Amino acid sequence: MAETLRSAILGALAEVLYVDETDLVDGDATDLRDLGLDSVRFVLLMKRLGIDRESDVPRRLAGNLSLAGWVHELEKLGEPV
């Protein structure tokens, strides 16, 4: 499931931030703010991933702004993406 989540998140990042895997200079631990993530793009990513903005999930994802962090949080929460 982790690889499926990772692929879905990476696909959303590619669409919203116009990045690909080669831009992850620190691998999955790369801070997404270094790739251009801001509050507007964060909302777009939540929408693209099908995450309800009114839920607790965006707050949890905002606590760890990396691909690895998001995979971990979404796995832990059992969120479908």
Image (tube, helix red, strand yellow):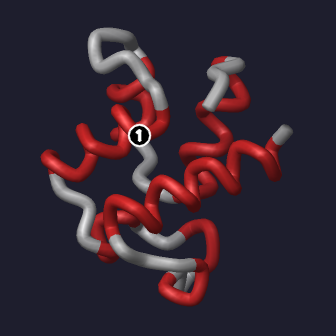
Q: Position of residue 13 (x, y in %)?
A: 45, 60
Graded by Cα atoms within 10 Å as few (under 14), some (14 to 19) or many (20 or more), the crowding at tag 1 reads some
The picture quadrant where one finds residue 48 is top left
Relative to 8, 34 lies left or right: left
Q: Position of residue 66 (x, y in %)?
A: 49, 58
Relative to 77, 23 lies left or right: left
Residue 26 versus residue 81 in the image, above or below: below
Q: Residue at x 33, y 67 (%)?
A: 17
- Image quadrant holding the N terminus, namely top right
Total marks drawn? Answer: 1
Q: Position of residue 63 (x, y in %)?
A: 38, 39
Q: Residue at x 49, y 85 (%)?
A: 23
- Image quadrant holding the C terminus, namely top right
The picture quadrant where one finds residue 73 is top right
Q: Tell me which amino acid carries mark 1.
A: Arg
Residue 39 versus residue 56 in the image, above or below: below
Residue nearest the observer in this picture, 63 or 53: 53
Residue 61 versus residue 31 in the image, above or below: above
Residue 72 versus residue 30 in the image, above or below: above
Residue nearest the observer in this picture, 50 or 64: 50
Q: Disc 1 on helix, strand or loop?
A: helix
The residue at which mark 1 appears reads as: 48
Q: Residue at x 70, y 43 (%)?
A: 5
Q: Position of residue 2 (x, y in %)?
A: 80, 44
